[in-house]
Image (cartoon, coloured by chain):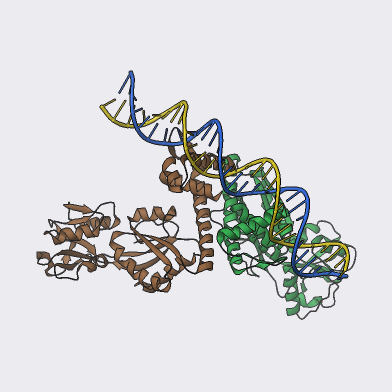
Chain colours: A green, B brown, C yellow, D blue
Amino acid sequence: MIDKLEMFIALAREEHFGRAATAQGVTQPTLSAAIKQLEDQLGVMLVWRGSRYQGLTPEGQRALDWARRIVGDARSLRQEMRVAREGLSGDLRLAVIPTALTVVSDLTAGYGDAHPNVRFTVQSKTSTEILSMLENLEIDAGLTYLDNEPLGRVTTVPLYAERYVLVAKSGHPLLKGPVKWADLAGVPLCLLTPDMQNRRIINQHLSEAGVQVAPQIESTSVVVLVSHVLRSNWATILPVRAAEIFLNGDDLGSVPLIKPDASHVVGLVAPHREPFTPVLAALLDRAKAVSELGKA
Amino acid sequence: MIDKLEMFIALAREEHFGRAATAQGVTQPTLSAAIKQLEDQLGVMLVWRGSRYQGLTPEGQRALDWARRIVGDARSLRQEMRVAREGLSGDLRLAVIPTALTVVSDLTAGYGDAHPNVRFTVQSKTSTEILSMLENLEIDAGLTYLDNEPLGRVTTVPLYAERYVLVAKSGHPLLKGPVKWADLAGVPLCLLTPDMQNRRIINQHLSEAGVQVAPQIESTSVVVLVSHVLRSNWATILPVRAAEIFLNGDDLGSVPLIKPDASHVVGLVAPHREPFTPVLAALLDRAKAVSELGKA
DNA sequence: GTGTTTGATAGGTATATCCTATCGAAAGGC
DNA sequence: GCCTTTCGATAGGATATACCTATCAAACAC
């Protein structure tokens, strides 16, 4: 039963029998049979059938919610028993927005010492991807914005409030002192791609300041932005936490962006499943410990 | 996996391999093997083994919590799919304290008309039995006291506040007007057995009024109490809701018990499992509709 | 039309499940 | 102290389930 629910979740995620089967490490006929058996046992059709996958029926959608919960709880049970057996261990899968990647080390630093048997897997993803991966049980926790987009049924630990700086090569004319958002009109910029929430936030502040931008370079990676800034006169806008790792040498400079003094809360999100698994509970504790904001 | 968790729950409940196997409709070797496989899969010992059942290990206790949740959710999934298939139907298992048995018809009256395919099974149980049956998934909801004993993780809908009356054969000298608890010293009484919470509540009020009682008749059934009252000069103490069904004729009389004007809240309790199954959600709605108290 | 993609079907084999029968250890009766 | 009963584990065998490979039929792309 639980195996079939896992396959059902995989099918809903991949929207493709063959891919879902591969993801589950079985062959396509096995997965097809499993879905059919699930439908027989539940007595309802879960998937619209044509010659190809055509989405879930309404019942399938409701069943998916239960399946996610049941499978998630079953994994929690197994994990908790493994912890009882061999102490905190296993793999903790994180997905993180690009501008918060440097914060991961704040979390792992203390954690890794205390629990050397816990491995971390960190992926860089957009905030919407993070939420959907959380739903699909593909990650255990995420690091993303807490105050902007609807989050769903999750536990959150606020970590810090993003503040923005303009980053450019040393000597750039705007690096003299704090820069207003409105001053950026006409400044050549490179920014994250518009599917990233950070970019949407920046767009919003720019447009509120009456500035139109058409960045010459867009990327999903902060490293790409900074390396372009280093080799040209382009500037970029980054949260302080994302920028400071590049500011050790003399090549780059940064100044605060003001008016408004924008601030967006970033924090840890995890599925809300009481009680938390020990590995996740330890991560949440660690997050609360390093948080700059009020304890949740 | 889920079947094994069901067997594990049954074993924890019955504390006996053979009985648990019977309860699950399998033979004892099958259940023994299932538990052993569960232990192998989880990699921990769940049950203290001797030549007989000796309780759960600490890991077994934790696993039991998860097992209850997983099995409960799996049942919810199946029930919700059945409802999607054939409308509200199935069996709704209730356990009720004896003094609230007459209230069940308030709930079922409207419910049965709207959903004729839902069957009710109603058992009379003590409040502690109700909570443990709720935990063990043996019932879907209960009717019990809400304000006295710790309830655990459940949803509650308050229904009414119990008020107490003295019930005796017409002509009994105490039936002239309201009776104080303190007036009951020396009055021959028959009461519920001390394992019932109602009796503990009554004992408390009596002892606070300085009255010692040693009932000649104790029973777990209100009917037994009333039939004794009818045939003798004994009196009994009952909540109004439990007494009024017997007060239609002229044979019995009742007067309020005052000083203090005791009041204890009775209501519906159900496992807290979001979202609720449709059948249970309908019952909770019905309970809120007939509640005399503030809506929860 | 032709080739490709996609999910369903068929058939065979390994595995898992569940039963009956029986055993050995511990507990209980007298 | 010995005998009986209770309880859970074990053994062996029949049945059901799960999963694979190979193949098919329908829909789509061009």
Of B296 and B278, nearer the camera is B278
Of B158 and A68, nearer the camera is A68
Asked where in the image residue B121 lies, by quadrant, the reply is bottom left
Asked where in the image residue B44 lies, by quadrant, the reply is top right
Q: Position of residue D24 (x, y in %)?
A: 76, 59
Q: Position of residue B113 (x, y in %)?
A: 39, 73
Q: Is residue B46 visible?
A: no
Residue B53 in the figure: left or right of residue D20: left
Q: Is residue A136 above or below residue A200?
A: above
Identify the residue at image location x=53%, y=60%: B78
Of A23 and A90, nearer the camera is A23
Identify the residue at image location x=16%, y=70%: B249
Of B142 and B162, nearer the camera is B142
Spot the residue most to the right.
A232
Q: Is residue A32 visible?
A: yes
Q: Position of residue D30 (x, y in %)?
A: 88, 70
Spot the residue most to the bottom.
A210
Residue A95 in the figure: left or right of residue B96: right
Q: Is residue B291 above or below residue A158?
A: below
Asked where in the image residue A82 lies, by quadrant, the reply is top right
For the C terminus of chain B, the quadrant is bottom left
Residue B172 in the figure: left or right of residue B222: left
Circle count: 0
Q: Position of residue B57 (x, y in %)?
A: 48, 40
